[in-house]
Image: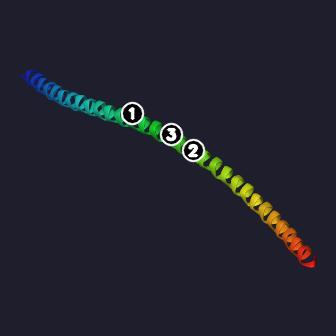
Amino acid sequence: KQWYQRRVAITAGIEKLREQLKSVSGDLVASQDEKNALQRKLDEIDGKSERLNGKYEKDLQEIRAQLIKANKEAESQKKDSKRSKDQLLDVKATLAETQDKIGKLAEDKKSL
C-alpha cells in the first residue's frame, strides 16, 4: 500500500512537472516570438536609418557643391570688382590728364 501511495505521489509530481514544463515552454515560445518581433522592428529602424543617412549624405554633398560654386562666384565677382575699380582709376587719371591739357590749351589760347 505504501508503495502504491508513493507511486501515486510520484506520478502526481511528474504530472505537476509536466504542467510546469508546458508553462515554461509556452513562456519560452512567447518570449521567442517577442524577440523575433523586436528584431523585425530593429531591422526596420536600421533600414530607415540607412536610407535617411544616405539621403542626408546626398543633401550634404549638394550643399557642399553649392558652397564651392558660391565661393567661386564670389571670388570671380571680387576680381571683377577689382578690375572695374582699376579701370575707373585709369579713367579718372586720363580725365585729369585731359583736363590738364585742356587747361594748358586754354591758357595758351588766352596768351595768343
Q: What's the residue at 8%, 25% (across, down)?
A: 5
State the CA–CA distance, disc 2 to disc 1: 26 Å
Q: What's the residue at 9%, 24% (across, down)?
A: 8
Closer to the camera in the image, 79 or 88? 88
Q: Disc 3 marks which residue? A: 57
State the CA–CA distance, disc 3 to disc 2: 10 Å
Q: Disc 1 marks which residue? A: 47
Quarter that holds the N terminus: top left
* 3 vs 2, front mark: 2
Q: Which amino acid type is shown beneath numbered disc 2?
A: Arg
Q: Residue 64: give its label.
A: 2
| Sequence order check, earlier mark of 2 and 1 | 1
* 1 vs 3, front mark: 3
Label 3: state its secondary structure.
Answer: helix
Label 1: state its secondary structure.
Answer: helix
Image height of 80 relative to 23, above or below: below
Q: Residue furthest front?
A: 112
